[in-house]
Image: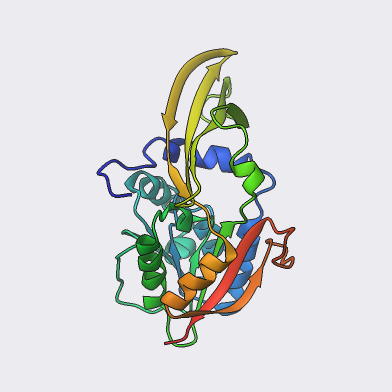
Amino acid sequence: MTSGIDPYAVLAKYYDGAYAAMTDLIDGPFYVDLAQRIGGPVLEIGCGTGRVLLPIARAGTTIHGVDSSLPMLGILREKIEREPPDVRERIRTHHGDMRNFRLEKKYPLVIIPFRPMQHMHSIEEQVRALTTAAFHLPEKGILAFDVFYPKFEVLQARLGEEILEIEWTDPSAMNHIVRRYYRKDAVDKIHQIYTLTFLLRTYEDGDLIREECESPTLSYYTYPHLRALFLLTGLEVVEECGSFSKAPLDNSATDMIFLLRRTI
């Protein structure tokens, strides 16, 4: 996060294809419904290429998006230009770092969907990111975000092994198949971070023609860790659940999803 190299320079190119192919990715409707229920304008921190932002705008809610990745924002801005005028008018985008950006506006709903908080690698960074989100909330505003529920036996399994995660057809070249593999390279149990390598391999008529890779480092959280962060940043839990179907946050949870508001 602190280097001059964009950690999504490669992944941005493949992001939409990969996640469109993941049929079990069901967080979008949760955030669209929340935006309609609370109303806009919404601030999305870590908006990426607009996977959540665009459906919220299409559903009629004004939304402003912030992301630190210029490649991601570039793709999003191209997609916005292809939207109808009424949708374009509901969207604003900003380049900024979730640890320190400040906009001159408060939002009744701030969202951090699909785990940008897991790119915050230290307590200091995590506090700064949540402080940024809280800064943009009015007194009764809501912050919503999710992180994955850690399965410790899975986190440490199959280290160093390449695993095929997803494949899809490149819409710009129908005889090209893209396969995304991941490899867990290291797990740091003390600092609760792990390093992955994503390998993007493109095949033409079965032959490998291109390979690119990126190696992000991700944090994972325990429930008490998150509750301590909320205390440090003046946030209290309004609602919590363990899945996007609003299952309880218990030992069977797949995600940790929180709705929060400011206490100070």
Judge left or right: residue 41 versus residue 144.
left
Q: How many marks?
A: 0
Residue closer to the observer: 199 or 126: 126
Which residue is at a point 73% across and 60% down the rendered structure image? Answer: 251
Q: State which quadrant residue 124 falls in.
A: bottom left
Q: Tell which residue pokes out farthest to the left in this image.
A: 4
Query: Which quarter of the rendering shows the C terminus?
Result: bottom left
Residue 142 visible:
yes
Image coordinates of residue 33 in percent, x first then y, are: 63, 69
Which residue is at a point 48% across and 74% down the rendered structure image? Answer: 230
Image coordinates of residue 142 in percent, x first then y, are: 52, 78
Judge left or right: residue 73 versus residue 220.
left
Which residue is at a point 56% across and 32% down the rendered structure image? Answer: 159
Q: Is residue 111 above or below residue 6?
A: below
Residue closer to the observer: 181 or 251: 251
Which residue is at a point 42% across and 50% down the rendered structure image? Answer: 76
Residue closer to the observer: 38 or 84: 38
Residue 144 visible:
no
Q: State which quadrant residue 43 falls in.
A: bottom left
Q: What sort of colour scheme is used for the picture?
A: rainbow
Image coordinates of residue 169 in percent, x first then y, are: 59, 28
Judge left or right: residue 46 versus residue 59.
left
Q: Is residue 18 above or below residue 32?
A: above
Q: Is residue 161 above or below residue 119?
A: above
Residue closer to the observer: 67 or 205: 67
Q: State which quadrant residue 19 falls in.
A: top right
Image coordinates of residue 222 in percent, x first then y, are: 57, 61
